[in-house]
């Protein structure tokens, strides 16, 4: 069974202590443990990577594209953090490795927050979007990815 890549962008390493009223008190390590359990329940392994650097995230998406082509990866669950709202390069990275399915996740409801969070460069290239369910959104995204890619 192909693996699922859980990719987290800038400042998500601070989950648990960062603005808990907005992002909750679950740490990234806890999110990774829960996501691994969800992926395994659905028959997949989980690989996790977090970076605060745009280029490292782009490299991870390129590598994921290659592994998808080789049949080793089912797709990516990706919280791009603030790069969501700024990064044409992340959009182009995802578009450049199509049809690798990337599910965009946001812990908070970005549409209920500041106007600068309302636009996503990533969304037009994403296969699906999960917004505003707290850290449970990662589990929902894994489930959505598995359903979306299920062979009929
Ligand atoms: C976020 C929302 C972004 O606007 C913010 O910059 C983040 C986290 C979320 O998960 O809600 O870093 O992606």
Image: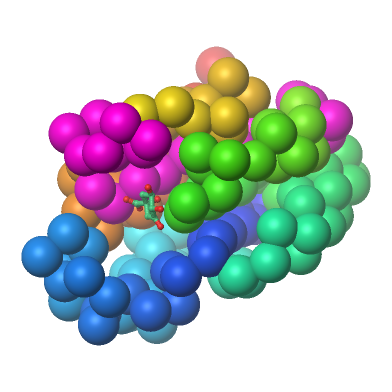
Image quadrant occupied by the C terminus: top right
Q: Where in the figure is residue 71, as x and y percent of width and height?
A: 81, 44
In depth, the one of 2 and 108 nearer the eye is: 108
Residue at 25% over, 82% down = 17
In depth, the one of 110 and 61 nearer the eye is: 110
Would you identify the image quadrant in which residue 49 lies?
Answer: bottom right
Would you say 124 lies left or right of 27 here? right
Would you say 116 lies left or right of 9 here? left
Residue at 77% over, 31% down = 92
Q: Residue reaching furthest left?
A: 21
What's the magenta region? 96-117
Residue at 24% over, 48% down = 108
Q: Where in the figure is residue 22, as x and y percent of width and height?
A: 17, 59
| Magenta span contains residue 101 | yes
Q: Is residue 43 visible?
A: no
In depth, the one of 151 and 105 nearer the eye is: 105
**Count of numbered tags:** 0
In depth, the one of 83 and 47 nearer the eye is: 83
Q: Where in the figure is residue 65, as x and y percent of width and height?
A: 82, 43
Residue at 43% over, 69% down = 12
Q: Is residue 86 visible?
A: yes
């Amino acid at each position: 069974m192909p693996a699922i890549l859980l990719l987290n962008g800038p400042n998500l390493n601070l989950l648990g202590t960062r603005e808990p009223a907005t992002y909750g008190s679950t740490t990234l390590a806890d999110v990774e443990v829960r996501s691994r359990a969800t992926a395994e329940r659905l028959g997949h392994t989980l690989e996790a990577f977090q970076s605060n650097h745009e280029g490292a995230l782009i490299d991870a998406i390129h590598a994921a594209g290659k592994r998808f082509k080789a049949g080793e990866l089912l797709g990516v669950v990706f919280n791009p953090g603030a790069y969501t709202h700024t990064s044409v390069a992340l959009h182009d990275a995802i578009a450049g490795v199509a049809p690798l399915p990337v599910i965009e996740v946001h812990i908070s409801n970005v549409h209920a927050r500041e106007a600068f969070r309302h636009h996503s460069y990533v969304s037009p290239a994403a296969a699906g979007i999960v917004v505003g369910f707290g850290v449970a959104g990662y589990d929902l995204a894994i489930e959505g990815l598995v359903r979306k890619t299920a062979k009929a």
